[in-house]
Amino acid sequence: MIREVITYPNPLLRKKSKEVVQFDEELHTLLDDMYETMMEHSGVGLAAIQVGIPLNVLIINIPNEDDIQDKAELIEAINPKITHKDGVQIFTEGCLSVPGFNEDVKRAQHIIVEYFDRHGNPKKMETEDFLAVAWQHEMEHLEGHLFIEKLSIIKRKKFEKEWKRKLKDEQKKK
């Protein structure tokens, strides 16, 4: 089932998510719905809080070299923790909860993440480049943060001004 993606400035996006304690059918349904929702919105990652569920759950599915998001490559991460990060990269990011806005963000180049799969099995992944960006971006959602918070004060003010104008224009259309 495709769920609604909540958008900035919805206060739920600022909520810190809770640890998952039950790896059950409800969790599996959430993961399946998140996948359908992410694909419907042409996303590469989605945190549960973005569909209004404050749990430490995220999914990532970046396109392969043929620009195809292969479901076999889908990462489903429960209670993820970054155990190591190093290096620096700047990547232009966007977010399904901040539609139509992209900006350069500085992040770690290389990370190691520990997490659980949908069945509660422990997993570990070492990654870099775009996949490392996706992990860091989605994990910020679990802490109640958005990528726009990483912008400089000048860029953040410009974003806020443009965003308010966009919301006003959408209200006029209704």
Image: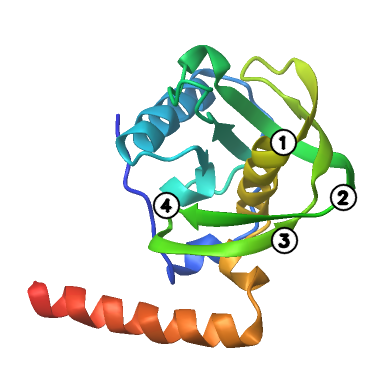
Q: How crowded is mark 3: few (under 14 residues within 10 Å), some or many (20 or more)?
A: some
User: Label 2, on which residue?
Assistant: 87
Q: Are marks 2 and 4 in contact (CB under 8 Å)?
A: no
Is there any visible trace of residue 145 in the rendered image? no
User: Label 3, on which residue?
Assistant: 106
**Gap between marks 2 and 4 measured at Cα:** 26 Å
- Quadrant where the image shows the N terminus: top left
Question: Disc 1 residue type?
Answer: Asn
Q: Are marks 4 and 3 in contact (CB under 8 Å)?
A: no
Question: Disc 3 residue type?
Answer: Lys
Tell whether 107 sits left or right of 149.
right
Question: Disc 2 residue type?
Answer: Gly
Q: Looking at the picture, tell me which residue is in the foreground, 92 or 28.
A: 92
As drawn, the residue found furthest toward the left would be: 174
- Relative vertical location of residue 84 with respect to residue 64 in this rendering, above or below: below
Q: Position of residue 169 (x, y in %)?
A: 19, 79
**Gap between marks 3 and 1 measured at Cα:** 24 Å
Q: Quick one: SS at disc 3?
A: strand
Q: Residues within 10 Å of mark 1 (few under 14, many from 20)?
A: many
Residue 166, quarter of picture? bottom left
At 47% from the left edge and 50% from the top edge, which residue is drawn?
50
Mark 4 or mark 3: name the one nearer the start of the chain: 4
- Quadrant where the image shows the C terminus: bottom left
User: Label 1, on which residue?
Assistant: 79
Task: Nearest to the eye among marks 3 and 1: give it.
Answer: 3
Is there any visible trace of residue 166 in the rendered image? yes
At 64% from the left edge and 40% from the top edge, which residue is drawn?
130
Task: Nearest to the eye among marks 1 and 4: give it.
Answer: 4
- Relative vertical location of residue 88 with respect to residue 78 in this rendering, above or below: below
At 65% from the left edge and 57% from the top edge, which residue is drawn?
16
